[in-house]
Image (tube, helix red, strand yellow):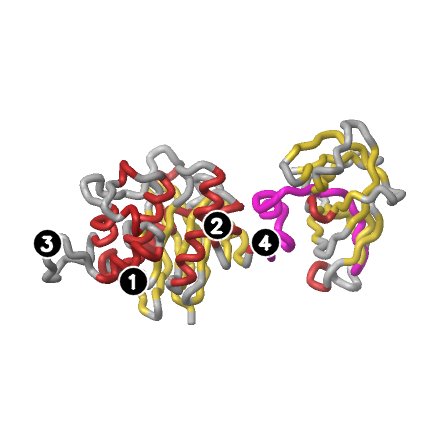
């Protein structure tokens, strides 16, 4: 069952600086998310992803379209269910914790209204959340006394405490350093899976999206470019624009004929979905990811190292082919080659994707 459904949603703002005085932040957007799954809206700043999140939460209305949550319509023509009646929890970018309340009191906030509790007594749901997010030892501390990562867990626990139908996370890791961001992303996914909570994450960071989400929607200029699982988006992007945004790689020249494409690195086979058996030969660009290009000292095919980036466990090499085109290759770090050195390479490309030849070549 789909927990969340958006049907042809558009969001338009008044904007005196634009032509016509109106700015369309989101255009005709549709997607669905199954119950218990984690979705992500991924895109650059200004693409409309936060506007979508705010519309789902009920903080803003939509100009057109419908939003459904667990089979009930919450947004539509003449319909706008109040935020407090949607059973939606929100984790804000700045955490929005109450500085005068302890960790436990922040998590319990919203659960105590209408309940008869002894002074200092916490609802059982709050106690469970404190344990779940690993903050039992910090329950009596105040937000300024704990780390940014712990504050984020408090914000998540508070959103989950009321057992909402949906949790929305707005750039939840952007204020954290890289190492903590990656670890917390994994922890948040584990917590959401344990509670079987349906969630939508908004981010501009591909690594966060892939670490947390089951399904990812890539947005550009208020339009949904592609929706799918992270593996599909990385290996089978539906446009060069998506390919560039969700990973590193290069577009090299090729000549496509039926189920095959000839490239400077040899002939590659295409999937049935990527070609027409009886189509005429055409000029294309072929997408190669760094993991498609394998360093092989025994290969007769050589490329010149023109740039390298040390990443600890591996190098990311930028290699120049004999025809001048450039590709990327991810190589274990014990293969330390010098700039201008020629090295052997071979292709191990299981997902060969082509785009129109008008797309620019070179690494991206």
- Residue that label 4 marks: 233
* Quadrant of the snapshot with the N terminus: bottom left
Place of residue 185 in the rendered image (x, y in percent of width and height, measured from the top left)? 45, 49
Q: Secondary structure at mark 1?
A: loop
- Residue that label 3 marks: 119
| Residue positioned most to the front | 137
Residue plotted at (39% across, 36% down): 18
Task: Give the numbered dot on residue 339.
Answer: none
Magenta residues (range) = 231-259
Q: Are marks 3 and 1 in contact (CB under 8 Å)?
A: no
Q: Nearer the viewer, residue 60 or 302?
A: 302
Q: Residues within 10 Å of mark 3 (few under 14, many from 20)?
A: few
Compared with 143, 128 (above or below) is below
Q: Nearer the viewer, residue 363 or 30?
A: 363
Left or right of residue 39, residue 153 in this image: left
Q: Secondary structure at mark 3?
A: loop
Q: Earlier in the sequence, mark 4 or mark 2?
A: 2
- Residue that label 1 marks: 163
């Amino acid at each position: 069952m789909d927990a969340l459904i958006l049907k042809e949603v558009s969001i338009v703002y008044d904007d005196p600086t634009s032509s016509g005085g109106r700015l369309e932040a989101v255009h005709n957007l549709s997607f669905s998310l199954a119950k218990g799954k984690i979705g992500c809206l991924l895109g650059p700043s200004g693409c409309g992803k936060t506007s979508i999140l705010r519309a789902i939460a009920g903080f803003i209305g939509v100009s057109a379209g419908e939003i459904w949550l667990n089979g009930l319509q919450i947004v539509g023509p003449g319909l706008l269910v109040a935020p407090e009646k949607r059973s939606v929890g929100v984790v804000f970018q700045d955490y929005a914790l109450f500085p005068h309340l302890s960790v436990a009191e922040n998590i319990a906030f919203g659960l105590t209204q209408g309940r008869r509790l002894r002074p200092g007594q916490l609802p059982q749901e709050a106690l469970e959340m404190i344990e779940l997010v690993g903050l039992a030892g910090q329950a009596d501390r105040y937000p300024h006394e704990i780390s940014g990562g712990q504050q984020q867990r408090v914000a998540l626990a508070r959103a989950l405490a009321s057992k909402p139908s949906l949790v929305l996370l707005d750039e939840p890791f952007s204020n954290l350093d890289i190492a903590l961001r990656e670890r917390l992303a994994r922890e948040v996914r584990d917590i959401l899976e344990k509670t079987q909570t349906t969630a939508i994450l908004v981010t501009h960071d591909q690594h966060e999206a892939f670490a947390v989400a089951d399904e990812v929607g890539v947005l550009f200029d208020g339009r949904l470019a592609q929706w799918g699982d992270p593996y599909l988006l990385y290996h089978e992007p539906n446009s060069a624009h998506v390919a560039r945004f969700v990973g590193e790689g290069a577009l090299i020249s090729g000549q496509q004929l039926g189920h095959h494409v000839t490239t400077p690195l040899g002939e590659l086979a295409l999937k049935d979905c990527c070609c027409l058996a009886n189509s005429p030969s055409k000029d294309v660009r072929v997408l190669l990811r760094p993991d498609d290009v394998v360093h092989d000292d025994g290969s007769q095919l050589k490329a010149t190292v023109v740039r390298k980036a040390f990443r600890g466990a591996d190098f990311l090499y930028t290699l120049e082919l004999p025809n001048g085109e450039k590709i990327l290759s991810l190589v274990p770090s014990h293969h330390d080659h010098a700039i201008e050195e020629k090295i052997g390479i071979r292709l191990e490309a299981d997902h060969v994707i082509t785009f129109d030849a008008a797309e620019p070549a070179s690494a991206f």
